[in-house]
Amino acid sequence: MNDEKYPDFLNEISNYLLGIANYSKLYVDNIITTIMQFLTFMNTYKFEGKYDSLNKFSINDVRSLSKSDIYSFIYYLADNGYKEGTRITKLEHIRTFFDYLYRIKRSLFKEPFKQIKREKRLGTTLPNYLSLEEAKKLLNVYKNGTKENEIRNYAILSIFLTCGLRLAEIVSLEINNINFNENKFTIIGKGNKERMCYLNNTTKDAILKYMEIRKDKTVSDKKDKNILFLSKYNKRMFRNSIKFMVKNALELAGLDSSAYSVHSLRHTCATLLLKSGTDIKLIQEVLGHSRIETTQIYTHIYNKNVEKAMLEHPLSKFKMQDALAFVA
């Protein structure tokens, strides 16, 4: 292990697990590898490439991580072909990491894993998504907005919830890739793969309304002249700006902003499509998943909801003796 490339707190946890907890070196190495992978993901996903070296990660950075961030990492693993058993193992590695910082080191003020249960399968906890009514509440925050940022934000939320785009895809969406006559647009997704997305009338109208404002903008950076969504400074929106907007919109809608992330809106799109009867292979195309196994995460969520609904069926407590009473 080259100590120079690890944050100090990782060296400390390694020494603790080896010397005090008596974990095997192989197991500790696996834990450290997972944590480094987790921090690398967070550096990109949450901190927008803030650090050029992971040894610059601080405890304050770790304190800012939430349950939603942990779920996003596990979903990222699924999206990149990691099998469920491996994801569960890595989740336990990260749990060990946070347990050490919270219980032993006492460096954290709260425990992100407090509400994350240990499960043999991840299907019941992954991913977080909004119900149909909650999604409507979120859209209603900006639905009747008249200010420039409100009109833009409504269009962004509409695309998230109806097209299932990733955050990076929203940020890089270009005007010249949208065909309003055919209600479709092309995007370059993960792995530089191009895919076609389709607009329903609601989302199309939301974008067109924003375009009436956008067309008069003079973009400060020429390379961003075709970028659809601009900040108030007429520049490409930063990912963190959109994350903050979504967090604020969730709070304005009366929803728990700590329970959901930007990626939850993509999850919501997929889950609502599945509940409406859309074939899983079509959902795979919508989301741009390279593997059907990744998309099938949503079937676990849906099947659990179906099971719950059946258990709560009005006749679920009707027993044989009740039937015999009617006959008598």
Image (tube, rainbow, N blue to C red):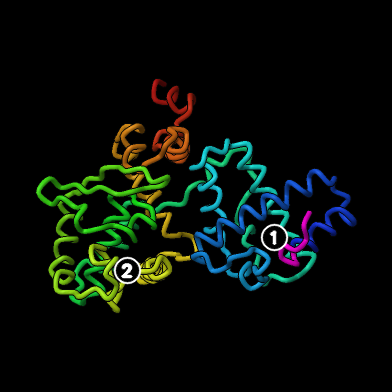
Q: Classify mark 2: helix, strand or loop.
A: loop
In the image, taking residue 17 as reference, residue 214 lies left or right, namely: left
* Residue 132 image position (x, y, % from top left): 32, 51
Pick the residue in front: 226 or 317: 226
Give the residue at x 25% y 47%: 186
Mark in front: 1 vs 2: 2
**Is residue 317 in view?**
no
Please give the label number shown on residue 16: none
Instruction: Give the Cα separation between the discs numbered 1 and 2.
Output: 35 Å
In the image, taking residue 142 as reference, residue 95 lies left or right, namely: right
Q: Is residue 4 magenta?
A: yes
Residue on which the image places disc 1: 98
Name the kind of residue labelled 2 in the image.
Arg
Give the residue at x 12% y 45%: 182
Magenta span covers which residues? Answer: 1-9
* Residue 225 image position (x, y, % from top left): 24, 67
Give the residue at x 33% y 37%: 285
Residue on which the image places disc 2: 236
Is the residue marked by circle 1 packed among few (<14), some (14-19), or many (20+) residues within 10 Å?
many
Compared with residue 192, is residue 219 higher up or lower down, i.e. above or below?
below
Q: Earlier in the sequence, mark 1 or mark 2?
A: 1
Q: Quadrant of residue 208?
A: bottom left
In the image, taking residue 311 as reference, residue 186 lies left or right, namely: left
Q: Is residue 20 magenta?
A: no
Extreme residue in the left direction: 181
In the image, taking residue 204 as reference, residue 149 lies left or right, namely: right
Give the residue at x 21% y 52%: 177
Compared with residue 121, is residue 207 higher up or lower down, i.e. above or below?
below
Considering the image in quadrants, where does the N terminus appear? bottom right
* Residue 19 image position (x, y, % from top left): 90, 56
